[in-house]
Each structure stands twice: as C-alpha cells, then as structure tokens.
Amino acid sequence: MAVKTRKSFGATITVGTKSYHTFNDWKMTIINNNYIGDPEVETNYLDVPGRDTMLDYSEALTGRPVYKSRPVRIELQGLREKMSWDIEVSRLRNILHGRIAKVYFDNDESHYWEGRIYLREMDREKTLGSFVLEMPIAQPFKYDKFSSTEDYDWDTFDFEEDVDRYIGVLDFSEGYTVEIPISEIPGVPVVPVINVTTLRSDTLTMRSSSNNKTYSLKRGRNRYPELKVAGASAVTLTFTGSAKLTIDYRAARL
C-alpha cells in the first residue's frame, strides 16, 4: 500500500451531502490508534449427545462467517479559545449527533465505515479540548468509496491495493460479456442490482459463471439474492439480447 504522510491525522465525516474533515475544518486531531473495533463473528453451537465437541453450525445458512456490528471510536483533540468550546461542540452536535454518517480515514481514503454517529465525552482544560466521535453499532465492513456505476477519483485511488470496479452503462444490441473482478484480498460477497433502463429485444437473459444459472431480466430493477459478486472468485456475466443497463454493486471487506 502506498504510504501517505500528513501533518495531522484525521478523517472525513460525511453526513447527507455534506463532508467535514476533522482537522482541515475543525482543527481536531485523532489521538487514538485503535479507532476501529475488532470484527466479532456470529457463532452458533449445538451440544449433541455422544459427540466429543459441540457442533459448530455458524456457517450452515451462509457458507461463510457472519459478522456482528463493530464499534468505531474516534478520540479528537484540539486548541480553541476557552470560552468558545461549548459553542463549537453545540454546533457540531447539531451537524452530526445521532445521524447516519460515513467515515473516511486519511490512511484509507478509498473506503468508508458507516453507522449512526454520536458526539460524546466532551472535556477541556483551558484552551485544550477533546471529545469523542463514536459509532457504537457500525457496519462490520468497510465499503468502497465508489460503486461500479461511479467513475473513480484517481487522486485517492491506491494502485497497489484498490480494484478498478467501474463498469458504467452497458449498451449492447447483440449481447455482452463482463467480468466482475476480485482483489488480492477477497472481499465479502455482495448482491448486484441489474438496472435495465432500455429493453429493445423480446427477451433479455443473463448467465452467471458463479452458479451456472440463467436469469430472465425485465425492464427496471433486477436483483437475485443467490447471485453474489466481489467474493473469492471472479464472476463472468453473459447477457443475451439488446438492452441498456447498469450492474450496480459496492464491494466490502473487513
């Protein structure tokens, strides 16, 4: 991974359509190292009579580990006029407290963590103040900043680790084949949405190499829970017919 250096380590907090950088906008520096909690696996065991150990059936339904929500805790510290701290914290609470937010850390700007965020534990000593931004129940995975339908911002793209998943709009008249790639670090399988905006043929089908199934697509939104991409194997989707569509998904990893 490419090493990026900054004078002060921070994060970008996005709430709705607005984004704020903890240092550039608020002059607050992240002072803790363990800001992302460990992923906790959801486990299920059954005590079977006559069996030496308990039966682990945690992956019986999914075929892979399932993860619980994980906490994100950001401890921030900065300098301000002593009398301005209460006003500043009140302003920030009005912006983000209790809202769904995305957090992009400076050392991983291509991914974000998502959850409901809270401003807590405000404290100050003369001009030095601190508070905590916490997502106690965040998603267990970090998500790609851009989905497969969004063009990349190459300024934040890490060419050693990130994967170019951009597909954009597919417009074809005699069929089309597209491969959904994987990265060196396989992510969590996600279900893509096939949005057909224009259907010019009587039928439109899609065959997946992951399960050798063929799906009949209709105009509008098509989603099949058993069809997953961005996991441990590349997936080839083969379309037959004439249409204009997008394959919309956002990769995720621990």
Image: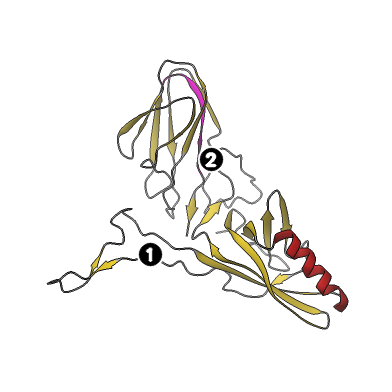
What is the x, y in percent for residue 232?
37, 50
The residue sitting at 44% across, 55% down in the picture is: 185
Q: Quadrant of the N terminus?
A: bottom right
The residue sitting at 87% across, 77% down in the picture is: 83
> Is 243 placed above or below 148 here?
above
What is the x, y in percent for residue 9?
68, 68
Is the stretch drawn in magenta largely helix, strand or loop?
Answer: strand
Judge left or right: residue 180 versus residue 30. Answer: left
Which numbered circle lies on residue 249?
none
Disc 2 element: loop
Q: Earlier in the sequence, mark 2 or mark 1?
A: 1
Which amino acid type corresponds to the residue marked 2 in the rendered image?
A: Ser
- Which residue, given by chain and number where applicable, does mark 2 sit on? 148
The residue sitting at 68% across, 65% down in the picture is: 10
- Residues under labels 2 and 1: Cα distance? 29 Å
Q: Please, which colouring scheme is shown?
A: secondary structure
Name the residue at the bottom extreme: 125
Name the residue at the left extreme: 50
The residue sitting at 66% across, 49% down in the picture is: 155
Residue 191 appears in which quarter of the rendering? top left
Q: Residues within 10 Å of mark 1 (few under 14, many from 20)?
A: few
> Is 16 placed above or below 68 here?
above
- Which residues lie in the magenta part? 240-249
Which numbered circle lies on residue 42?
1
Which amino acid type corresponds to the residue marked 1 in the rendered image?
A: Glu
What is the x, y in percent for residue 17?
70, 48
What is the x, y in percent for residue 32?
62, 75
Q: Is residue 243 magenta?
A: yes
Residue 101 appears in which quarter of the rendering? bottom right
Q: Residues within 10 Å of mark 2 (few under 14, many from 20)?
A: many
